[in-house]
Image (cartoon, rainbow, N blue to C red):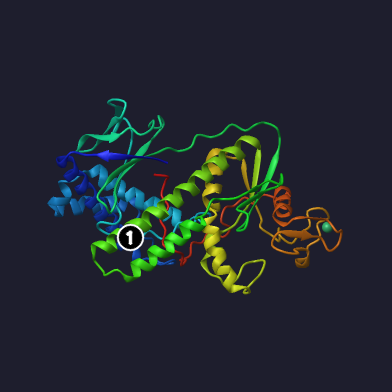
Amino acid sequence: MSRYRLIPTPAQEAVLRDHCRHARYVWNLAVEQHSHWHPGRKSAPGYLEQCRQLTQARAGYPWLAAGSQTVQQQALRDFTQAMTAFFDPGNPAGRPSWRKAGRDEGFRIVGRGRQWDVRRLNRKAGEVWVPKAGWVRFRWSRAVPPDAKSYRVTQDRAGRWHIAFAVIPAPVPAPGNGQVVGIDRGVAVSAALSTGQLLHCPGPGVRERARLRRLQRRLARAKRGSTRRGRVKHAIARLRARETDRRKDWAEKTSTGIARRFDVIRVEDLKIPNMTRSAKGTRDNPGRNVRQKTGLNRGILRSGWGLLVRRLEEKAPGRVEKTKPALTSQRCSACGQVDRASRESQAVFRCTACGFAGNADVNAAWNIAAGHAVTARGGDGVARPVNREPHLLLQPA
Ligand SMILES: [Zn+2]
């Protein structure tokens, strides 16, 4: 992610603030329309229908009509994309939620060359074209990715403006070595490769967790609406943002490395939303260990597994195969025997039939590498409402 500090003039800042307000208004209108919709009902308004409604809204509200149509239409497109992500079983994104003033301020512009462009002024500054605001300066803290297709402008709670350029990762060429890798996802180990390599997605460190707990206690004591409360909330948001950045960075590097080393990448076709939806049980262990599972839910999300798989699919298109997640953790990769007792502990697998022993996650990764691909994504394809932590995952911004 490449994020830069934006430095608008006071006049430009007023325009940016309007863009944020309009994007938020349009987004919330879409949330409102979709909130009355449930599976089985007549479909909620799609993008085109919403665009028609936007035209009507603009005709009715001069303040909306005075704003940029580009910004407003993009907010609708972002919403549609967020809904698609929400219904994608491989994506942990939650239902698009309300955007609050002063909290989720931002807008997105796509179409480089038509709607926007970027140019460098000097060693330390660049300019980006923002509809209706013109060329806005930003700190050239590092090179702007030449293949950036869109950007997102945001204002944080401290009132600072940022711009982030989004890049769709270019496909990584296959090495052509005929090698197949199986990847098992886990909580203790984020990803175990069938090569025996164990990968760990960075989570919050001990000190960070302690700091977060301290801040949360302070937040609980702070009066609603106070400056102090605002400051504490801002500090928490920054801590979380840093953690997310690290996770994204890990998924980025790991996916590139894997796409470069192997021709075929096999992963389990896990329906993460189904697994994280409730602690009541999973295929391997229905309805037991509910307390550990609650922790597991958070662990899955934290491990960045969904992000890793999505990046792999982008970087190695057509080379990622999803296999049926049937008993991979209980099956012996040497003789094929399936026995729950073979899984001696979280880390150790010891086959009760042939005596083969090894790392439990790597054993599972071998089974996945040998597994058969499932064709249809998501199986039955029926979208269901799920109660997950509200968490919006758009394009990398
Ligand atoms: Zn065996």
Quadrant the N terminus occupies: top left
Quick check: 289 above or below 243? below
Asked if residue 24 lies left or right of residue 397, the reply is left
The residue lying at 62 percent from left, 58 percent from top is: 188
The residue lying at 73 percent from left, 50 percent from top is: 366
The residue lying at 21 percent from left, 43 percent from top is: 68
Quadrant the C terminus occupies: top left
Task: Name the kind of residue labelled 1 in the image.
Answer: Lys
Quick check: 208 above or below 13? below
Q: Residues within 10 Å of mark 1 (few under 14, many from 20)?
A: some
Asked if residue 327 lies left or right of residue 174, the reply is right
The residue under label 1 is: 233
Asked if residue 77 lies left or right of residue 272, the reply is left
Q: Can residue 365 be seen in this view?
A: yes
Percent x, y of residue 178: 71, 35
Residue 34 figure quarter? bottom left
Residue 342 figure quarter? bottom right
